[in-house]
Image: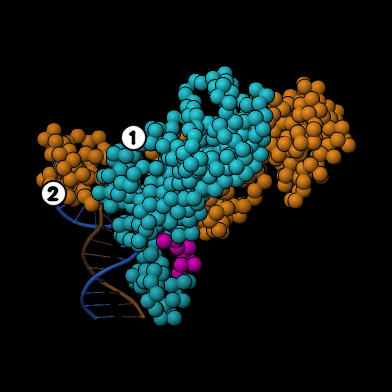
Chain colours: A cyan, B orange, C blue, D brown
Amino acid sequence: MTTLKDIAKHANVSACTISRYLNSNIVVKKETEAKIQLAIKELGYVPNVVAKSLKHMETFNVAVIVPKINNLYYSEMTSGISQTLGKHHYNLYIYEVDNLNLSEDEILQLMRENMIAGIIFIGLFSDVSFKESIHSVVEWNIPVVYANRCIPYDGFPLLYPDLTKASKLGVEHLLLKGKNKIAFVHKHLPDHLLAYFLDGFSQASNGEDQPLIMEIKEGMDLSADCIPILLENNIDAVFVLNEMLAVNLAKALVQANIRIFEDIAVLSLGNSLISEISTPELTSIDLQNRELGIRSAEIILSQIQKQEFEPITVLEPFIVERKSA
Amino acid sequence: MTTLKDIAKHANVSACTISRYLNSNIVVKKETEAKIQLAIKELGYVPNVVAKSLKHMETFNVAVIVPKINNLYYSEMTSGISQTLGKHHYNLYIYEVDNLNLSEDEILQLMRENMIAGIIFIGLFSDVSFKESIHSVVEWNIPVVYANRCIPYDGFPLLYPDLTKASKLGVEHLLLKGKNKIAFVHKHLPDHLLAYFLDGFSQASNGEDQPLIMEIKEGMDLSADCIPILLENNIDAVFVLNEMLAVNLAKALVQANIRIFEDIAVLSLGNSLISEISTPELTSIDLQNRELGIRSAEIILSQIQKQEFEPITVLEPFIVERKSA
DNA sequence: TTGTAGGCGTTATCAA
DNA sequence: TTGATAACGCCTACAA
């Protein structure tokens, strides 16, 4: 391995001259420059970022803490983060919580040990992990961003899609299509989040009606346990608050010989490849996952570079009309 | 920030005693131990991995170089890598090539600058990037693994699925279902890879017949340009060598009122969520992406730890029978 | 069982 | 314009 000292000796200049030449715009003599460049080329010098990090007491590493990466929902955000970090020459660490079997505290310790420049927590809306220890991170002055949490502002920047708007958009669309008996179908959605959707519903329907709320619990079968209830209640549109669930429900409806759209419209919250692949193609509310990632990275960078940043970023969802609603 | 020196002073012991206590199993006096532990707790000491890395001239960071992460094909592998690295307390860097706009050389320079412990290249089968500079990595003695390349062995460990076997499995399955006029449909698959599939075909069919080879080129429309050819040739089964293409072709067939399975069976190479979601659910050849990731990580770790490792790992595909074939 | 001193590769400070 | 020196936090001979 070639060090600064090596090329210094080889070029007959001091190490610090070379360091200055490489890292600042302080001018050196033409002659010196030539000698240095020659030495770098001949010995194949590559600077050592680890030594720099130690000297400067900072790294260019940002960590993303994510439940799992093999999920389009998260990988789309992560890709957005990667894109932005890459542009600014930051490196991206990935820590998959579901995979790692590390406690909250252990992960945070890891962050400190490695002098992580900033941490982006990506979570499910309903996820409440990293709620306690997060404050100790703030104490350590490690920049932190919470992506995809609809929790009350708590001292660190948050980014999330506007769920009320998403709901309003969706319900308006369904009403426009002549659907009046709407059911919200969800899975483990806590009440405080459900409230956003109900709010959106009443905004769209002028508070005239109430949707049917249907929670799919562990072990429930869509065909046997869910569809009959939809029929009993004369539901003509389901707004499914989870894309995968929407796909499965659409499948179950088709199997039960219920015409999607004509009999029951299906609207998906979340718009990835799988909505497009599903048959019929699902009309979906796009929550802008990639954009969420991009913005999260921008905010973590602003924090790292001690610049101003928005404490709360709310992304505007939009609707993508396909066949199912 | 609390350093070793700080707690040394606070505990009235030397820094090196503490270092030994923390990092080796050399025993210290009970009394000293107590003093040290107290100091660590009181001052909230966290070791500095960057300093360690500089001292030892090695990191615990492994980099995955991947075309894009927001793709189930790659993210499944990456998740497998993450799982294995996590178990061994290695960190995972992700570099998305499609996103980064970095040349091959620049990425490799980045690896050296950051003292990366090992590099896993994940690629498309057909990808030939990182073919030239890779040799300079080997010169630098950075452990390297190539995942998912079917190229002749070239001095660094390779992992890939057995494509011939995949093809044989698939064709055997189709023959068993009474399908005799088989077409291979692919997209940009180079000849040397196509050869594996043809080999598998002749193994399965005892060389009696030849499949129709159909390449989907940029801008081609499946319904207009592809299906008519299938019909003209009385094709009764398509083996699609790309999962996404399989999904789209299945869709186009349904739209053309061709019964999938009865009229034309569709078999997908690659088995992710999207085969399952597709209607009808696609029978698929699973290439074991997660396992590929796990094994890749194991091999990179073996290399890093100077242990023995397999130069070539070939994974056995298996078939997942669903509705389409 | 514990402490001292030097160095990993880089850079900031100060002096020349 | 350049060079000597010390320091970032940690670890390892070597000495005590």
Direction right: furthest residue: B232
> For the residue marked with disc 1, what is the amino acid?
Ser
Instruction: Name the spot of residue A175 as percent of width and height, x first.
Output: 57, 40
Cα distance in 3D space between marks 2 and 1: 31 Å
Q: Is residue D6 depicted above or below B10 in this figure? A: below
Instruction: Name the spot of residue A134 as percent of width and height, x first.
Output: 30, 43
Q: Is residue B67 depicted above or below A274 in this figure? A: below
Of A251 and A260, which appears nearest the observer?
A260
Residue drawn at x 62%, y 52% is: B129
Give the number of the disc on residue A260: none
Q: Principal SS element in the magenta part?
A: helix
Secondary element type, mark 1: loop
Asked if the residue under mark 1 is in contact with the one under mark 2, i.e. CB atoms within 8 Å, the reply is no
Instruction: Name the spot of residue A220 as percent of width and height, x first.
Output: 51, 21
- Number of marks present in the image shown: 2
Within 10 Å of disc 2 (Cα), the crowding (few <14, some 14-19, many 20+) is few
Of A121 and A241, which appears nearest the observer?
A241
Segment tinted magenta in the rendering: A39-53
Is A16 magenta? The answer is no
Quarter containing the C terminus of chain B: top right
Residue drawn at x 72%, y 44% is: B187
The reply, left or right, for residue A108 in relation to residue B107 is: left
Whether residue B263 is visible: yes
Give the number of the disc on residue B9: 2
Q: Is residue A120 depicted above or below B200 in this figure? A: below
Q: Quadrant of residue B213?
A: top right
Check disc 1 and report the residue beneath it: A103
Secondary element type, mark 2: helix
Identify the chain of the residue marked 2, using the numbered disc in the image: B
